[in-house]
Every structure is written in structure tokens, then in C-alpha cells.
Amino acid sequence: MSKLNSERLNSFGTASIPKLVLQFSVPSIVSMLVNALYNIVDRLFVGQEVGSLGIAGITLCFPIMLFIMAMSMMIGVGGNTLFAIRLGQKKYIQASIILNNSFSLLLLMAATTFTLGEIFMEPLLRLFGASDQTLPVASSYMRILLCGAVFQTVAPGMNHFIRSMGHPKTAMFREVIGAVTNIALDWLFIVQFRWGIEGAAWATIGSQLVAASLITQFFVKKDTPIRIRWRHMKLRFAYVRKIIILGIPPSIMQVCNSLMNAILNWSLTTYGAISLHDTGALSGGDLAISAFGIVNSIASFILLPLLGFVHGTQPIIGYNFGARLNARVKGTLKFTFIYAGSFMLVAWAILMWKAEVFVAPFAPSDLKLQEVAAWAMRIFGAAFFMIPLGLVSGSFFQGTGKALRSMFLNACRQVILLIPFMLVLPHFFELKGVFMAQPIADTGAAIIGVLMLRHELKKLK
């Protein structure tokens, strides 16, 4: 081990905990902010230039987009895990085969997604709650995105390998470039060219093309030690099987998130039609979906940076846990709880106080949509201040190698508690019940997480 690596590892057990957490969290926070920008920018421009119908169309497509991301994650994370192991074993030929097989699988996944998406797109959108008004808008947006499926799978999937080869800043830089390009193209295509919802789709595809090109360029440079090579791209069943097996666990939550969003859209359409009056431009169900599209964008912009901050603590917790430096494990947890909790408490207070200010830019000319979105935001975000308790607890279990417990806590918030409440509560509270399901799930996951963490910390002596 080099002196540099030795000093870096030793710092986990000796350096200031706040300094370490910030050092490892900032790149993760930037990466998560990039993901949040992809989610929020399209809806912001579409809301201002196209209107509430455009926001509804994008929101209806979200479950399909999440599923594409899940497939990319399965190949990217599974292949990268196996790749990192072979690098550690200094089996570089096998590592090259794994990287190239993963690249081939991502291309195959993109082709499959495009084909199935074109065949089943309209039935799926109908199933997700599309009406006669929103179906043409959502179909137009989704059809363009499917044309760029290859960029949506290759860019995030191959970026994992750049990190494993010791270039986390390079990976982060390519993500940032993609996000900045997306903002610029949204302004150009939607505001200047007046392409409407199609402009938003082309902007997304253009930004992902830029990101995918930069990432692919990294793997064809001569100074990259393990590159994309045609002779290693031929799929080998033994490697494909291992890549998929290793990639399934982290992608399950994304698939569940896609399923949850599909159920949510259906519930919003059904109970929005009951609870809200038609506005002329939109039916009650479409109005509810548009409102949730705004709420989801604002929530992701708050929660994703928090998630990046919490993820930055995992290697610090893992090292000190393995070194039996239990005081530093508890110190890291305490610091993370305090700062993550303080951030979310302030964000929650501002959001509850001024929800109208945050939703207004998405629908500047639609006062009814602003009113419904602000109402929904206050219900949906009622337990935001509880979320750090569950997230930090899950991060502890992930960092200490207890991945199943971490997955269980994540599943509590997104699946185990959320989906049943989402199906049951609307029978009693109609549309309000759809939005109430999230804060109840947040609270339940926080309580379960704290109880599990407390039990685990008692073992640390």
C-alpha cells in the first residue's frame, strides 16, 4: 500500500469527524443535486411555458423513466461490484471482460426498452392514469425519450466504473456537465424555439447524449488502463449471470419506486376526479397529477442533497466500525443526526410556512393549480423533519455491512408502509388520503430505524 493510501485510510480513525464527513459528503451531495436538477428543470420550464397539462404529461411518464433507471442501475452497480473485486485481485483481463460485458448489456437493455416502450407505451400510460387530455402530451414526451434510451442507460451505468478506477471527481464532472447542458437546452428549446413538451424531451435527450459521450470517451482514451474493446464485448453467460445477480438488490428499490409512482398516479387520477372540480383546462384527476408533479420536484430538491450528505458518512462509519473505534462510530452518527436533522427541520419549517412561494414558479398563470399544489405540499411534507432519523439509521447499517437491514428500512418508507397506506387511506379521506400516506410512512420508518439502531448500538462496547 502506498504512503498516500495509508495516510488516507488512517485519517478515518484520527481526523476531525466534521471535516471527514464534509470531505466525503460534498461530492455525493453534488451528484444528488445533479439528479434533482434533472427532475426539476424540465417541469419548471414546462410549467412556465406550456402549462399544467405539460406538467401532468411529464408526471405520468415518471414511472417508466424510473424503470429505465432501475435497469441501468442493475447493470451498472452489479457490473461495477464484480469489476472492483477483480481489480482488487489484480485479474485485469477478467475486469476488462466484465466492463465490456456490462457495456454490451446496457446497449441491449436500451434496445429492449425502446422496443417494449413503443409497443406498450399507450396502454401503460392509460394504466398510470392518463386521460384523453393528457395521453397525447405524455405520449409525445415519452416517445422522444425512448429514442434516447441508449443514453439514459449508458451514462449512469458506465459512470460507476469511472469511480471504481479512482476518478470520482471525473465522474462527478461528467454528471454536472450533463445537468448544465439540460438547463441550457431547456431554455433554448422551450423558451426560445417554443417546442413545448417536445422541447423538454429533446433537451433531456441532448443532455444525456453529452453525458454519455463524455463517459464513453473516457473508456476509449489510450491512457485509460481498462478500455472498451470489441473483442471483450461478446456476452459471456457466467459473467452476465453474476452481474445481474449482484445488481438486482440495489435496483429492487428503484423498481419498487416505479411501481409506487404508478399506483400513486392511478390514485391521484381516481380520487382527484372525486375531490377536485374540473378547471376547464384540466379535469380534477389531471389537476391532482399536475400538483403532485410540482410537489415531487420540490421534495426531491430537498431530499436528494440530504441523501448525499448521509451517504458520505458510510465509509467513515464502516472504517471505524471495522477498527472497533466505537466512540468515533457514535460520534459520526451524532454529528450526522444533528446536522441532517437541523437541515430538514429548517427546510420543513420554511416549506410549511411558504409553500405557495415554492410552487408558484411551476404554474405562474394557474392560480388553482398553485392552490392545490401548496395544499398537497403541506400534507406530503408534514413529516419531513422525521426523515433523517430513518435515513441515518439505514446509512449506519449499510456502512457496517448489514445491507439487508438497510434495504428493509428503505423499503419501509417506499414500499412496506407507503403502498398499503396509499391504497387504504383514500377510502376514508379521498385525495387528502393519497398525500397523507407519505408522512405516515416517513414517521413509521423513522421510528423503526431508531429502534433498530438503538438495539445495534447497545452491542458496541
Image: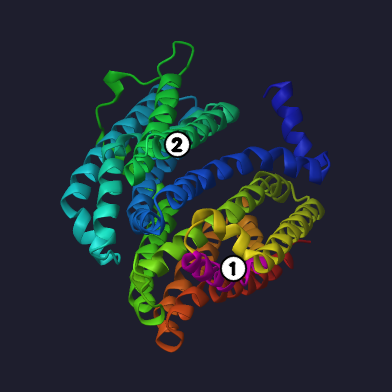
Helix, strand or loop at label 2? It is helix
Mark sitting earlier along the chain (2/1): 2
Residue bearing the label numbered 1: 381
Horizontal arrangement in the rendering, residue 4 relative to residue 188 (left or right): right
Measured from the top left, where is residue 441 in percent x and y? 54, 73
Q: Name the residue under label 2.
A: 80
**Which image quarter: residue 257?**
bottom left
Q: Are marks 2 and 1 in contact (CB under 8 Å)?
A: no
Examine the rendered structure and indicate whether residue 156 appears above or below residue 36: above
Locate the C terminus and report the quarter of the image it occupies.
Answer: bottom right
What secondary structure is marked by label 1?
Answer: loop
Q: Tell me how the rendering is colored.
A: rainbow
Residue 131: x percent and y percent? Answer: 26, 66
Badge nearest the viewer, 2 or 1: 1
Q: Which amino acid does label 1 sit on?
A: Gly
Residue 297 within the magenta-colored segment of the rendering? no
Q: Where is residue 309 in the image (x, y as percent from the top left)?
A: 66, 48
Q: How crowded is mark 2: few (under 14 residues within 10 Å), some or many (20 or more)?
A: many
Rendered image: mark on residue 337: none
Q: How far apart are marks 2 and 1 (CA)?
A: 35 Å
Q: Judge left or right: residue 265 versus residue 321.
A: left
Instruction: Give the amino acid at mark 2.
Output: Asn
Q: Is residue 219 above or below residue 86?
A: above
**Which residue is outermost to the bottom?**
428
Q: Which residue is drawn at 28% across and 19% down?
A: 230
Q: Give the range drawn in magenta.
A: 367-386
Query: Where is residue 13 shown, x and y percent of the image?
Result: 79, 42
Kindly report the secondary structure that dominates the magenta region of the rendered protein: helix
Q: Is residue 368 magenta?
A: yes
